[in-house]
Amino acid sequence: MKKFLVMVGSCMICGLFISGPAAAEDMSNYELNERVKKLEEKMGAGGGAEWTDRITISGAIEAEAGFVNTDYDDPGSDDVDSSDIVLSTVELGVDAEIHKHVSGHILFLYEEGEDIVVDEGFITIDGKDVVPLYLNAGQIYLPFGQFESHMITDPLTLDLGETSDSAVQVGFANDIIDASVVVFNGDIDESDEDDDTIASYAAGITFSLPDGSIPNVGLSAGVSYISNIADTDGFEGFLEASDQVEDHVAGVGAFVSLSFMDMIFIEAEYIGALDDFEDGDIGDAFDEGDESKPSAMNVELAVALLENLELAVRYGTTDDIKGGIDDESLPETQYGITAAYGLFDSTTLALEYLKSDYENDDEETVITAQLAIEF
């Protein structure tokens, strides 16, 4: 086992230098050999078991079978039925405890039709029992929006507001409050600026009810802010120009999550722009001459009918997002129901019915069966 770990560690280090030619050129063979030797000594001299105890591996696999009915409002377009079986999601996470106050996190993600990517990769420095402060540096999801859901399909709030970027985050966290601010170099600049600088930021604060403070009741609520909502992953697809807007438009998010006796769950969230985008920024998603302030809302109610059976319903809406299915727009309204049954530990079978109505009166009905495991 130790020999295997030494071999893996050596390969990882060599791989890092091979993938970064510039760094390898600056380092002599002697220096590289010395680093590998030190790692081998650390792992081989009784340190292997200690090192592996610091590593935690987790992940998820989701396989789905789906049926889609597309009903176009245009009489000249035929309705379309389709179905498929896909490996929808694979996640593999690695967490490493480097020191009492230092840890690292990597999350590899595969989604149907996409390449495998490093979805998250960051270093955390925190105060733990000393001070309730933390710092994350690397590829992270910004503290803008919460996106809690009991359904198979992501909520419209996530489609509009989720944001992943390389950033530095500083926060304060205890049993009641988690507040943080993050700075990053956004992809979307103002049209009159040529500087490629760290000029975007986001902030969020979440309040949670301490366990047991109100018997059988769980509560968390929060608000968040982003200096340029056009930097969100979902919003960039609506832009006329891929990297510019006339003026940055800030965004705000708010959510409430309630539970009663761990049997009834209520999720409510809003994500939206705080000001209008100028004509020409949004492109085909809006009529010519319009100034628009996009937003999305999601409300869900979930009930644990039995110990392993949960039933959830959703109602979601968007505003100021025009277009139809072929425009890759977001639905104007969305509603549906999901039943999820825990077959075994960390193994869930779910069935979802979801109806989406678009601003141009296109309609889409999706039935999805999902088998998922977590480890």
Image: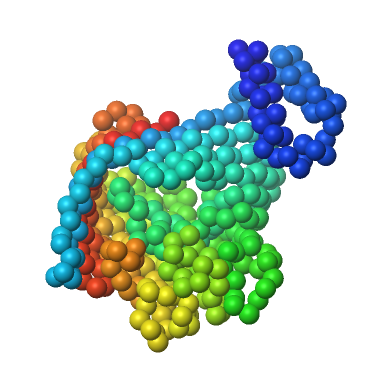
Picture colour scheme: rainbow
Quadrant where the C terminus is found in the figure: top left
Give the x, y percent position of residue 6: 67, 18
Which image quarter: residue 307? top left
Give the x, y percent position of residue 210: 47, 50
Residue farthest front in this picture: 76
Residue 206 placement, left or right of 216: right
Which image quarter: residue 29? top right
Residue shown at 66% from the left, 25% from the top = 11
Residue shown at 45% from the left, 38% from the top = 91
Which image quarter: residue 335? bottom left
Quadrant where the N terminus is found in the figure: top right
Tell which of 244 and 91 is nearer to you: 244
Residue 166 placement, left or right of 37: left
Tell which of 175 and 246 is nearer to you: 246
Answer above or below: position of 120 versus 331: above
Residue farthest bottom in this picture: 289
Residue 103 seen in the current view? yes
Give the x, y percent position of residue 342: 27, 34
Answer above or below: position of 128 versus 157: above
Answer above or below: position of 2 versus 155: above
Residue shown at 66% from the left, 18% from the top = 7
Callout count? 0
Tell which of 360 and 49 is nearer to you: 360
Residue 286 placement, left or right of 56: left
Give the x, y percent position of residue 274: 47, 77
